[in-house]
Image: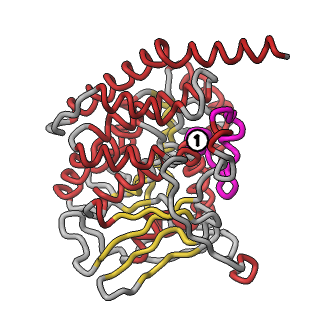
Amino acid sequence: MKSLTILGATGSIGVNTLDVVSKHPTRFNVIALTAHYNIDLLFQQCLKFKPTYAVVGSENLSEHLQQRLRAESVKTKVLFGGDALAFVANLDEVDTVMAAIVGAAGLLPTLAAIKAKKQVLLANKEALVMAGPLFIEEAQRAQITLIPVDSEHNAIFQCLHGQVVCDNPCKNLAKIILTASGGALRHKSLAQLQATTPAQACQHPNWRMGRKISVDSATLMNKGFEVIEAYFLFGLTLDQIEVVLHPQSIVHSLVEYLDGSILAQLGSPDMRIPISYALAFPERINNSAAALNLLKVARLDFLAIDEKRYPCLNLAYQALRIGGTATTILNAANEIAVQAFLDGKIYFTDIAKLNQDVLEKLHSRPVSNLSVILEDDNLAREIAKEMILKHYSARVTKMVRRKSVIR
């Protein structure tokens, strides 16, 4: 039986992980669940799975959740804060950690799990984007294989038959091909993109995801981060990573070998498929995902990327070419930019512009230690916030006022 800590239990990955776990009560034992602020859902999860520990973002939330659990005679101990996240990722009784905290917040607890030689199921792509060299170095030192949960990287992992060692990549591999749906706005004209609302950007046609990752899908920044993740995870060169549009989201990625053979992993757009594979690897288990009906799908389309529509993808390649903390800077700028868009402070088209501006403003440094990464992450965020106040928000405010006058 595998004993699990699920970092980010109330997000979409965490919820789907627990759905798979619930189908196999004799295979998995939930030791710890974490959430930032969604204690209502975490409370329900604790009632059902009765973990030893639960972790939340603040002391007030921890006290409130602890009281609710005691009232139901549930003995789960509630902790809070970053140190608590690292603690539950490092528990002796835990052998597998699902790293599903979104954004930079997942960096330290995921790194703690790797250092503790846990089997890490990596759903937090920002960890590799921010600190790829350090993560790979620690994984090699711990002699563990990071099992990717992202549907695209999990597809590659499957096509490589799990033979992934970042310092000794598959010698027969020619390249990998990451597929991208194009997000919620792929049918909008370039002229229409500036007026895109957060609600429109978050209406993904194929996947049910959170707001931040849905916006990243619409800008293709998400795919850019996946390029960075693949670069480090599979020990590839940039020339070995290709991205194509695949609107149906049925082919999750492909691997091309030197002999011209191409292997693809196909499946319904349901995250329970890669999650179940990661949880049970090298076995396969039932996950309740709908079976793929090829006759119903009928066709599979593959299209070239329009660089004018998706400038964020090129920024990822640019950051990798720069090297050092450039990918850290890009990730930090993007988190600020996406949140500003969701808050109505900048236009949708400003996300890529702001990312580019911050990447050019803050010079990359060699990734020598974690402190350098965290410093540049913080600097990039501050620069992005300053740029929004000085150069971006004023334009949006004027536009809103002008529209109000016209009405």
Residue occupying the point 28% across, 29% down: 374
Q: Which residues are magenta?
A: 194-214
Residue 163 or residue 54, whichever sits in front: 163
The amino acid type of the residue labelled 1 equals Val
> Mark 1 — residue?
215
Taking the magenta stretch, the answer to whether it contains residue 211 is yes
Q: Is residue 93 left or right of residue 10?
A: left
Residue occupying the point 36% across, 52% down: 93
Residue 95 or residue 362, whichever sits in front: 362
Quadrant the C terminus occupies: top right
Residue occupying the point 53% across, 36% down: 35
Taking the magenta stretch, the answer to whether it contains residue 161 is no
Residue 318 or residue 306, whichever sits in front: 306
Residue 41 position by quadrant: top right
Q: Position of residue 147 (x, y in %)?
A: 38, 62
Q: Is residue 17 left or right of residue 336?
A: right
Residue occupying the point 51% across, 43% down: 8
